[in-house]
């Protein structure tokens, strides 16, 4: 197993935050590399990761404020008092980039403690949500096409790159996921086990007082399975609940909403909201979110399927491929462009998978297709229809329009729409 550090795109955002705030809290799912990445910036490191260390620091906590800055406090949530100490220290010093806090934000038994922790740091702490690795970070995208460059240069052009990947490769990437440890395992069979192990750990999560976070793990698992069956769709939550209720009489609406919130707090589920632009006509947009996992491998683990299962069911393959592309676009957009991911749906049936929006009003639209001329043409037509609906007296022209595929060539249509596989993209 390789132990070499893998560079992460989030490093760009970490640098910006450390130069603009006194302390930085890096959150996100377990095992995405938060601590490993933070160590690249720290000059002093304290870890609350063993009982002996925790016992020592509880009676000598102020010592963790000493040392060359930035100071990294790993597994900070094991001694919650450190948060207030750092907040006060940042106020006193008025310096930037003094502290980095990392750790798996374990569920708090006392909601008042959670509220205090996450609302008392306004103006002192900056916050980053860290995602699993993109294909470019895992060295599985050539990176010939830059998302940032597409926004900057409307005349961006590239050669007719052909994807070096096969559908078999893409199916494996989906099932393996972007977990750093899985990339260090050479045997594919074992690399696939990483996401399954993580999935099992989610269901057995403990609170800060050692109690099960999900009182009924079987119901929690059935909920994740239902979510996975509705991946990349806008299936209503009420429909999902009804499906679960029909098979599990003990499943209540309260449990459904409670577990949904818990999965979101654990950074497992990551839906995308709708985009509401100014339109020429009075078309009503649909505001339902599109359902996604933070990494497609978690939905794969929930359904207990394999790369070969995806290859034998192209419809399911396409839905999970969309989830993979959404993950990568989040990484590229949020960390390098300070942009957000949304989707477009309207009452007339027009759907566009991704709208990347920036604070300055710039936007781009992307359709995600597994491949094939017919599917690509559907994507192109959806993008053209959306472009024609926008009221450009109140909205900017799109920075670019693109169809992202799993495999195939990269090219630009005669009317300026890009078509390229995800394995060509970078931030």
Image: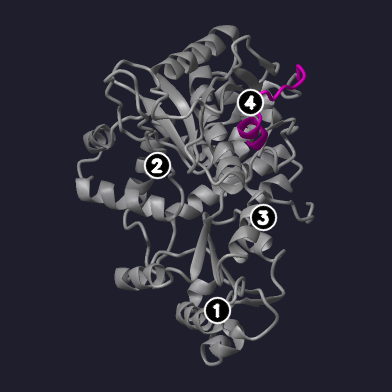
Q: How far apart are marks 4 and 1 (CA)?
A: 42 Å
- Label drawn at residue 137: none
Location of mark 4 (residue): 154
Q: Position of residue 136 (x, y in %)?
A: 70, 39
Does label 1 or label 3 sit earlier along the sequence?
3
Secondary structure character of the magenta stretch overall: loop
Q: What segment carries the magenta color?
A: 148-161
Q: What element carries label 1?
A: loop
First in residue order: circle 4 vs circle 1? 1
Q: Which residue is drawn at 52% across and 43% down?
A: 339
Q: How far separated are the C-alphas under marks 4 and 3?
A: 27 Å
Report the side of 397 relative to 411 (left or right): left
Q: Does the magenta stretch include residue 372?
A: no
Instruction: List the residue tagged with mark 2.
Output: 224
Q: In this view, does 21 lie above or below 144?
A: below
Q: Mark 1 points at which residue?
A: 94
* Chain-order first, disc 3 or disc 2: 3
Categorize mark 3 by other alpha carbons within 10 Å: few (<14), some (14-19), many (20+).
Answer: some
Q: Nearer the viewer, mark 1 or mark 2?
A: 1
Residues marked 1 and 2 touching at CB (< 8 Å): no
Answer with mark 2 or mark 4, whichever residue precedes in sequence: 4
- Dot placed on the residue nearer the N-terminal end, 4 or 3: 3
The crowd level at tag 4 (other Cα within 10 Å; few <14, some 14-19, many 20+) is: few
As for residue 150 lying within the magenta part, the answer is: yes
Q: Residue furthest bottom?
A: 59
Is residue 178 positioned above or below 53 on the image?
A: above
Q: Are marks 1 and 3 in contact (CB under 8 Å)?
A: no
- Judging by the rendered image, the residue that carries numbered circle 3 is 11
Please state which of residues 287 and 298 is positioned toward the viewer in this rendering: 287
Residue 334 point in image, percent of width and height? 55, 46
Camera sees residue 204:
yes
């Amino acid at each position: 197993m390789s132990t070499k550090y893998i560079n992460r795109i989030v490093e760009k955002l970490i640098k910006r935050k450390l130069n603009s705030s006194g302390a930085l809290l890096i959150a996100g799912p377990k095992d995405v590399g938060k601590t490993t990445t933070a160590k690249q910036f720290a000059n002093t490191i304290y870890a609350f990761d063993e009982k002996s260390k925790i016992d020592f620091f509880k009676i000598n906590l102020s010592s963790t404020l000493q040392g060359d800055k930035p100071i990294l406090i790993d597994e900070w949530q094991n001694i919650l008092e450190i948060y207030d100490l750092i907040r006060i220290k940042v106020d006193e010093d008025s310096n930037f980039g003094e502290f980095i806090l990392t750790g798996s934000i374990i569920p708090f038994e006392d909601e008042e403690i959670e509220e205090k922790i996450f609302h008392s740091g306004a103006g002192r702490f900056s916050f980053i949500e860290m995602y699993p690795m993109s294909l470019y970070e895992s060295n599985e995208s050539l990176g010939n096409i830059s998302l940032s460059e597409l926004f900057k240069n409307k005349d961006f052009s590239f050669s007719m790159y052909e994807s070096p990947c096969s559908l078999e490769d893409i199916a494996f990437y989906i099932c393996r996921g972007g977990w750093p440890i899985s990339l260090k395992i050479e045997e594919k069979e074992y690399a696939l086990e990483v996401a399954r192990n993580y999935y099992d750990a989610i269901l057995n999560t403990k609170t800060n007082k050692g109690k099960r976070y999900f009182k009924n793990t079987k119901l929690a698992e059935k909920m994740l399975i239902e979510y996975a069956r509705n991946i990349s769709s806008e299936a209503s939550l009420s429909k999902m609940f009804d499906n679960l209720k029909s098979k599990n009489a003990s499943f209540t609406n309260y449990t459904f909403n409670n577990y949904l919130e818990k999965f979101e707090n654990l950074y497992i589920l990551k839906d995308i909201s709708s985009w509401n632009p100014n339109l020429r006509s009075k078309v009503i947009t649909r505001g339902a979110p599109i359902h996604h996992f933070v990494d497609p491998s978690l939905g794969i683990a929930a359904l207990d399927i394999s790369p070969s299962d995806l290859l034998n069911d192209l419809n399911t393959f396409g839905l999970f491929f969309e989830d993979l592309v959404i993950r990568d676009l989040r990484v590229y957009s949020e960390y390098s462009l300070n942009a957000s991911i949304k989707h477009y749906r309207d009452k007339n049936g027009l759907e566009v998978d991704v709208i990347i929006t920036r604070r300055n009003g710039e936007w781009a639209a992307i359709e995600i297709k597994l491949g094939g001329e017919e599917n690509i043409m559907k994507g192109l037509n959806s993008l053209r229809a959306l472009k024609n609906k926008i009221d450009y007296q109140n909205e900017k022209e799109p920075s670019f329009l693109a169809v992202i595929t799993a495999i195939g060539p990269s090219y630009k249509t005669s009317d300026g729409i890009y078509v390229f596989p995800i394995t060509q993209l970078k931030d």
